[in-house]
Structures are given as C-alpha cells and as structure tokens.
Amino acid sequence: MASRQRRFHPSPVYWSRPMEVLFNPFITSVLESLRDGFVFLDREMRYVYVNDAALRLLLKPREEILGGYLWDLFPHEPGSLFREPADRAMATGQPTHVEGLNVRRGVWFDCYNYPSQQGLTIIFRDVTDRKQAEAERDESQALFRMMADAAPVLIWLSAWLKQELD
C-alpha cells in the first residue's frame, strides 16, 4: 500500500490554537503530568495532541508531529505489529492493545489504542527494561531446568565414583 501523502489544511483550527482552547486547562495539566506517552489523532490519523512524555518517547519535536499523518511520520512495513491494532481500533470502534519491539530503535513499547468519534487516543510506554529483565529471568530458569534435569545423572555418577574409589 502506497504511503499516504501528508494532508495539511491551510489553517486547521485545532492545530493553530493552544491546547488550553482545545482541552480544559485542568485536563491539559493532567495529560502533561503523565509519564506515559499520550497522543490524540483525528479521524484522518493526523496528530492533534501530543504530551511531553510522548515527545520524549517518539524522539521528535512537537512542531514536526502536530498535523502530521501517523504513518508518514512513523512508517511501518505492511503488517506491522503497531499498525494493525491502531487500524483495527478505528475500524471496529473497539480498544486494542499491543506490546512489541520497534525494530528500528530497539525499544519495546506497550500501546493501548482507544477509538472515539473524534479519532484515536494512543497511550504508550517504553517497557524495554521489563522485557530485558523477563528475557534474563527466562534464560536463568532455562539454565536451572537444565541443571535440575542433569542432577539425577550427576548423583548417580557421584555414587558410582564413590563406589569405584572405595
């Protein structure tokens, strides 16, 4: 599927206004206090709102993101782990969740997609540290299982050696 061209309206009302006009100041302060990335996309999948945590996770300035089409700014190959749940949420009106590796950056993200009549809210976080800890735990458990499986043989060998040496 060909990449969608970025569509900018000459002066979109919601892109040119401060967030306080779009959102109640209380709501804006709550969204900015989140450690999770929080973005809101319109029905065309263009960025309308991006909190500071999302900017840190996305590694792009607000000016580059706002008004931009999601899949132009963050292109993913067809069948991408992140694209399908976002598209499905918009198509079905049902929330979706995905946890996956952004291969280009080597970062694991945990993403929740919440559709509405106005667009799509995405809440996401970097879970790379947790995924690395899980991988280390799994490796340790596999090593322990291998040692436990080998224990009867070692015990038998030990008994046999003791018998031979006596």
Image: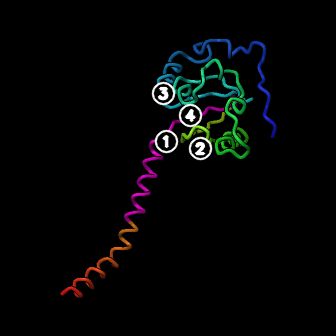
Residue drawn at x 22%, y 83% is 162
Identify residue type, mark 4: Ile
Q: Amino acid at mark 1?
A: Thr
Left or right of 8 in this view: 26: left
Query: Can you tell which of label 2 and label 1 is closer to the viewer?
Result: 1
Q: Which mark is residue 34?
A: 3
Q: Are marks 4 and 2 in contact (CB under 8 Å)?
A: no
Mark 3 to mark 4 CA distance (whole Å): 10 Å
Q: Which mark is residue 123?
A: 4
Q: Is residue 83 left or right of residue 54?
A: right
Residue 157 in picture, x, y percent from top left: 30, 81
Name the residue tied to disc 2. 97
Q: Which residue is mark 1?
A: 128
Q: Is residue 128 magenta?
A: yes
Mark 4 to mark 2 CA distance (whole Å): 10 Å
Tag 2: amino acid? His
Are circles 2 and 1 on residues that touch, CB within 8 Å? no
Where is residue 124? Give x, y as percent. 55, 35
The image quarter containing residue 82 is top right
Which comes sooner in the sequence, label 4 or label 2? 2
Circles 3, 1 touching at the beta carbon (< 8 Å): no
Q: Specify the amino acid type for callout 3.
A: Leu
- Asked if 82 appears above or below 43 in the picture, the reply is below
Q: Which residues are magenta?
A: 117-144
- What residue is drawn where x is 35% and y is 70%? 148
Quarter of the image for the N terminus: give it. Answer: top right
Which mark is first along the chain, 4 or 3? 3
